[in-house]
Amino acid sequence: MKISMNERDFINLLTSIDAPATPPEGLKESVLKSAIREGTSSEPVLSGFERLIFEKPFRAAGLASAAVSGALWAILGSGFPALVSGWIG
Amino acid sequence: MWRVLFRSVVSPLRVFNRDGGKDKLSASITVVLSTAVLGTVLLPVATYFVYRDRYELTLDVVGMLTAFCVSVLTWLAVCLLFWTLSKAFRNGLRFRQTASVWGLSYVPNFLCVLLYGVLKVVPGIQITSGFAAFIVSALFILLLVWKAICYFMFLRFVMDTTLKEFVITAAVSAIVFAALIWVGSLAGIQVPML
């Protein structure tokens, strides 16, 4: 297949290919900002202790509860449930 | 909405943040209202119908509605407290964000009211001693610790407090919480809802 093109169009085409692509003003900054925001908001930086507690709070609460209840049971014996039921009402 | 509720239990870090959304606010309101209805309406009604033959009981509808309103108002009061403190710290937290996240911390409250209701309403369950009493007591402590973790998550990831702001918030909220628990007990709320 033969494509006809005059000389002016051919020069324009070559010029447009060689010209560096320039994004609209502010586009780079907005893309960078959104990438940073996404990266920091979804995954906060946590210490090891915070990771243990905040990633699975139910599990952490279960472990803490078992430890506290066991200790109170060992110290107070049957007085422990009485203490909790009195506290709950 | 259900996805937000599921995440608030399984992976709360994905919801205890400032990212907004209608789903989050509606999930928050749903949890708070469910807890309030369960504790102030369903529980007294169930108690009345179970024990009305055994004891002389009356259904105090006005009292129930008052307790329900106080439950919802205490939630709003705590949201207002956190929002005001955040304004004072210039953290840029909006009231909608506060209400959207703090309501999600009512999941342990809901389970606590449910456990309390089962123990109170179901006939024949008188757990006062033995290993079963130990398990029930441990469950109450678990829910209390879970709520405390939600509170600290709120301060850390939503209010984004510094150590000084954290100490101030903890001190002020301790006083306000105590006052609201007292007001709630006057209104007949048996399990504190904050």
Image (cartoon, grey):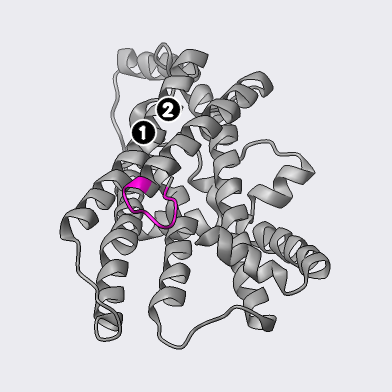
Which quadrant of the figure contains the C terminus of chain B? top left
Seen in the picture, residue B21 relative to B130 is either above or below; the reply is: above
Which residue occupies the foreground of this view, B138 or A30?
B138
Which quadrant of the figure contains the N terminus of chain B? bottom left
Which residue occupies the foreground of this view, B67 or B111?
B67
Residue occupying image coordinates x 47% and y 70%:
B115
State the residue lying farthest toward the front: B56
Chain label for disc 2 = B
Q: Position of residue A66 (x, y in %)?
A: 73, 66
What is the three-letter code of the residue carrying label 2?
Answer: Leu
Residue occupying image coordinates x 73% and y 51%:
A52
- In the rendered structure, the answer to whether residue A8 lies left or right of residue B165 reads left
Seen in the picture, residue B134 relative to B69 is either above or below; the reply is: below
Circle 1 is placed at which residue position?
B77
- In the rendered structure, the answer to whether residue B136 lies left or right of residue A34 reads right
Q: Quadrant of residue A14?
A: top left
**Cα distance, mark 2 to mark 1?**
6 Å
Q: Quadrant of residue B63?
A: bottom left
Which residue occupies the foreground of this view, B96 or B129?
B129
Circle 2 is placed at which residue position?
B81
Query: What stretch of residues is rendered in magenta?
Result: B186-193
Q: Are marks 2 and 1 in contact (CB under 8 Å)?
A: yes
Label 2 sits on a secondary structure element that is helix
Chain label for disc 1 = B
Q: Quadrant of residue A8?
A: top left
Is residue A17 visible from the viewing direction of this image? Answer: no
Query: Are marks 2 and 1 in one subunit?
Result: yes
Q: Which mark is residue A80?
A: none
Seen in the picture, residue A29 relative to B141 is either above or below; the reply is: above
